[in-house]
């Protein structure tokens, strides 16, 4: 571990250059998120980054990952950021950390904890005392863990960020200064920086006096650096996010970018003597319910898919791509990076078809999964202490009534409507074409609304994104009251009781067993034939699937499997085939 207080080092700005221990250095960095990669693969991915000619790794730190409930902190397993940084240091890499309260990153709520929204009065990303009180409590735990890993204490961390692309959101200079002071007073004495888009408004609002300013872009480096020079003429040039790939939303084509184009833009930066951080070098996976969403226009909600492959230098499963070799060749013309030495390849295997032999209807399992509450209004998730997953609202309506449209004010994000247990249709956020109408018989009817939180917004003006039903429900003009509510975070599928599988036309869990006779290998779960839901492997939430694509396979890292029986649970929201099954392939299909 490269952490030794007697081996303190310095990383600083001297004129328009970076210096490490007094020697000029250009940073060739790559973003890699420990929270999107199983810990068993951290070293493999970091070694590949170094083999590509990079000298630095950069990572965000998601607050919601480390403080899932107020005052309950998690730094084990996939959340062991200290171990990730230590591995990078042992390999000989510098580390850039971007802790911020907010990270964007196409991550759920931009890394902010959903429980902040339980208080309707809290104001995000500004000098709001309620918000800053929670930030301080988080920093009091996080920053002491990072302090021993600073280069000034013999560790590999050379720089840390204040907030993230703040100029794209607000202009509260007092808030940014508060964060800077909070980091300094907790012993963070390495280089601090900000990163923003290369525009006047963003650089004016997102930068902090006396703190290094960097810019983010995917092309046009000369123009971006000219704009940065207008504000900081005597500091090093750095692109803190070089977008060499891009992420995908459900229902969109998979994004790709030509490797030669990526290398050409990199070369333009290197000719400017600039430093660069590739966003991303290796994307990884949005496991669980941690994918984010975009919403630049209020009626256009776009959730991000499970794969965070990003079409970058290492694929989602850690394989070098054409960009890896093209970028390495470009770097080699500007630095001595030696011969290419890659770790041993990680094997892939097509385990084949696995029948889903057991099933459990959601409605038959409610008492196992949740304790119901009765409320006048269909309250939002956060008010009930729920962060992620699904929530079920049930009420009874008298009859007879003529056919009227069911109006949800407003749904966040996708609701399945049932009347007396019969599926009526779906109502989707931002989709005016999804409507449900029904008549009520003389004896009345039971209405059930199953709402899925498809990911909180991670960027833009609509960041404050509460989930569930956020106002009320009407049948025609009349609001409906007296609801029974089941919160369904789906954080423990071992509670389910199964029976033999058969045709199913309502939400249900399906269970099958994958037999692995030898050391497990990486594989890809093909969900062709299924509609929409969630995948669990040995109790681990692999993420969401949806036949809208673009992806139709879902990456299963070998460490999630074991020799012998492996439990596969699929929570399917819609109907299934008469003989439900999944297939494990040895290649991804990302669209």
Image (tube, rainbow, N blue to C red):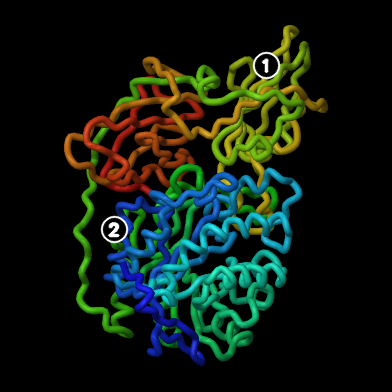
How packed mark 2 is, by other alpha carbons closer than 10 Å (few <14, some 14-19, many 20 or more), is: some
Task: Give the residue at x 68% y 51%.
Answer: 464
Task: Give the residue at x 31% y 54%.
Answer: 41
Side (left or right) of 390 relative to 564: right
Identify the mark nearer the N-term, 1 or 2. 2
Q: Between residues 256 and 344, which one lies in front from this camera angle?
A: 344
Q: Between residues 326 and 169, which one lies in front from this camera angle?
A: 169
Residue 319: mark in rendering: 2
Circle 1: element type? strand
Circle 2: element type? loop
Q: Is residue 103 above or below residue 364?
A: below
Q: Can residue 433 be seen in this view?
A: no
**Toward which corner of the image does residue 353 lie, by quadrant?**
top left
Q: In this view, does 261 lie above or below 84?
A: below
User: From mark 1 to mark 2, how far is it between C-alphas?
Assistant: 51 Å
Task: Give the residue at x 70% y 25%.
Answer: 437
Q: Count all numbered tags in the image, as a single digit.
A: 2
Task: Give the residue at x 58% y 66%.
Answer: 164
Q: Can residue 366 be seen in this view?
A: yes
Q: Between residues 539 and 322, which one lies in front from this camera angle?
A: 539
**Residue 169: image x %, image y %?**
67, 64
The extreme top residue here reads 443
**Residue 22: image x %, image y %?**
40, 89
Q: Name the residue under label 1.
A: 446
**Residue 76: image x %, image y %?**
41, 50
Residue 502: mark in rendering: none
How packed mark 1 is, by other alpha carbons closer than 10 Å (few <14, some 14-19, many 20 or more), is: some
Q: From the image, which quarter does the N terminus lie in?
A: bottom left
**Residue 54: image x %, image y %?**
34, 74
The extreme left residue here reads 518
Is mark 1 in CB contact (under 8 Å) with mark 2?
Answer: no
């Amino acid at each position: 571990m490269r952490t030794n207080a007697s081996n303190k080092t310095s990383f600083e700005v001297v004129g328009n250059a970076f210096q490490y221990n007094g020697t000029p250095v250009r940073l060739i960095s790559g973003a890699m998120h420990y929270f999107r990669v199983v810990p068993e693969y951290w070293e493999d991915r970091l070694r590949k980054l170094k083999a590509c000619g990079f000298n630095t790794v950069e990572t965000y730190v998601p607050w919601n990952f480390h403080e899932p409930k107020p005052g309950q902190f998690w730094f084990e397993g996939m959340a062991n950021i200290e171990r990730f940084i230590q591995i990078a240091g042992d390999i000989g890499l510098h580390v850039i950390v971007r802790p911020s309260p907010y990270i964007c990153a196409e991550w759920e709520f931009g890394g902010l904890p959903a429980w902040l929204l339980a208080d309707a009065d809290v104001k995000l990303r500004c000098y709001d005392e309620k918000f800053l009180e929670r930030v301080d409590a988080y920093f009091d735990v996080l920053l002491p863990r990072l302090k021993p890993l600073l280069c000034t204490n013999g560790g590999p961390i050379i720089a840390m960020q204040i907030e993230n692309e703040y100029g794209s959101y607000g202009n509260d200079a007092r808030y940014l200064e508060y964060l800077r002071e909070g980091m300094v007073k907790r012993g963070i004495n390495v280089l601090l920086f900000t990163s923003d888009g290369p525009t006047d408004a963003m650089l004016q609002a997102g930068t902090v006096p006396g703190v290094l300013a960097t810019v983010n872009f995917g092309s046009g480096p000369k123009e971006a650096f000219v704009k940065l020079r207008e504000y900081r003429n005597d500091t090093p040039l750095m692109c803190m996010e070089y977008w060499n790939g891009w992420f995908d939303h459900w229902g969109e084509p998979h994004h790709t970018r030509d490797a030669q184009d990526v290398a050409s833009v990199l070369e333009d930066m290197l000719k400017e003597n600039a430093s660069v951080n590739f966003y991303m070098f290796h994307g990884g996976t949005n496991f669980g319910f941690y994918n984010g969403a975009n919403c630049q226009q209020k009626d256009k909600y776009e959730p991000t898919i499970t794969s965070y492959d990003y079409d970058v230098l290492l694929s989602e499963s850690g394989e070098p791509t054409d960009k890896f070799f093209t970028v390495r060749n470009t770097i080699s013309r500007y630095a001595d990076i030696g011969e290419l030495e890659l770790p041993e390849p990680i094997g892939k295997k097509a385990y084949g078809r696995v029948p889903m032999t057991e099933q459990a209807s959601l409605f038959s399992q409610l008492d196992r999964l949740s304790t119901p509450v009765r409320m006048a209004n269909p309250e939002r998730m956060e008010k009930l202490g729920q962060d992620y997953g699904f929530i079920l609202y049930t009420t009874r309506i008298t009859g007879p009534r003529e056919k009227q449209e069911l109006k949800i004010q407003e749904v966040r994000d996708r609701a399945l409507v049932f009347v007396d247990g019969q599926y009526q249709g779906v109502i989707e956020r931002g989709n005016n074409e999804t409507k449900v109408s029904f008549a009520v018989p003389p004896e009345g009817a039971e209405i059930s609304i199953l709402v899925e939180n498809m990911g909180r917004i991670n960027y833009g003006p609509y960041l404050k994104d509460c989930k569930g039903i956020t106002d009320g429900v009407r049948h025609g003009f009349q609001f409906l009251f007296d609801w029974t509510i089941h919160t369904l975070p789906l954080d423990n599928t071992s509670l389910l009781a199964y029976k033999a599988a058969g045709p199913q036309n309502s939400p249900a869990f399906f269970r099958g067993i994958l037999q692995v006779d030898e050391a497990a290998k990486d594989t890809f779960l093909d969900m062709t034939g299924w509609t929409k839901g969630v995948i669990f492997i040995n109790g681990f939430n692999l993420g969401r699937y949806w036949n809208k694509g673009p992806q139709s396979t879902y990456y299963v890292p070998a460490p999630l499997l074991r020799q012998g029986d492996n439990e596969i649970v699929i929570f399917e929201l819609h109907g299934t085939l008469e003989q439900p099954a999944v297939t494990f392939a040895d290649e991804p299909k990302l669209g």
